[in-house]
Image (cartoon, helix red, strand yellow):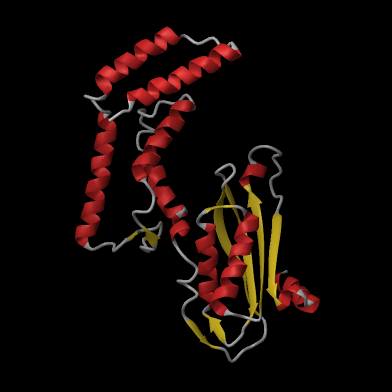
Amino acid sequence: MTDWAKIREKITELQKAGDVLQVPVNWEEIGKKLAELQTGGDTAPDQSVQEEDKTAEKSETAKAESGQTSGYAEDGNGAGSVPSGQTDAARIREGVRLLLEGMGEDPSREGLLETPERIARMYQEIFCGKWQSASEPLAKTFRAEHTDLVLEKDITFYSTCEHHLLPFYGKAHVAYIPGDRVVGLSKLARTVEIFARRLQLQERMTTQIADAVMEHLKPAGVMVMLEAEHMCMTMRGIRKPGSQTVTFAARGVFQQDRYLQEQFFQMVR
């Protein structure tokens, strides 16, 4: 149920701010509109919202009953690798509708009618790393017979900048000097994916990958390098398409051994 008392309180705050800033606002008209909404809002909720919520609920129930997922929702390839029930789909749908209205769009027109639901499903997929841990892919290790540098390079990743909610994407290169254990190469790529599928900063993502490998594999050293293009720099603001941001993090023997660092940089080129 709508909390009309809080709405009135907020309007009062806005009115005071408007008077101070001398912003012309028709408060009488807003009061009338508020009264209309209160009269109909508590007794006649938005039918389209109810129908979408019911449809989503039926869909999740059908999946659970069919055994299609067990705590996981399908990703874009039907791999069933995206944790379900972690994002609040209803609030995301509501937020997208408000965003569309704020842009001057009509959320009820044909092309936008299902957009809130699409965005909710997409966010479940591209931000699923928030509820995953690198301990999962890095848990399965093998006794090391190779103690020289191991490098997995050109790992493609897509992430989302938390400042503008725009994508940044590129390549990750992960190297380590094994201690007494090694890990399957695909697990390094999965570790990158876990940290990429979050609201991120490239600098933080680089550090998180290096620290995770160091913590779970206990190697002699780790070196991580990320090269990425940021859409917040190419489609807005400075608008410099093709520009690359490069970050790297060194741990263990890589921090002091310049020869190992040079070997790493030569191998990734």
142 left or right, relative to 71: right
Q: In which quadrant will I find the C terminus?
A: bottom right
Q: Nearer the viewer, residue 211 or 164?
A: 211
> Residue drawn at (72%, 75%), measured in percent from left and top?
254
Residue extending furthest right?
258
Q: How many marks?
A: 0
> Residue drawn at (49%, 27%), measured in percent from left and top?
103
Figure check: 172 above or below 258: above
Q: Position of residue 179 (x, y in %)?
A: 61, 85
141 left or right, relative to 109: right
Q: Which of 78 and 102 is in front in this view?
A: 102
Q: Where is residue 168 in the image (x, y as percent from the top left)?
A: 60, 51
117 left or right, relative to 142: left
Figure check: 206 above or below 258: above
Q: In which quadrant will I find the N terminus?
A: top left
> Residue drawn at (39%, 45%), measured in percent from left and top?
120
Q: Where is residue 169 in the image (x, y as percent from the top left)?
A: 60, 54
Residue extending furthest left?
65
> Residue drawn at (41%, 43%), measured in percent from left and top?
119
Figure check: 120 above or below 186: above
Quadrant assignment, res 8:
top left
Q: Where is residue 158 in the image (x, y as percent from the top left)?
A: 55, 56
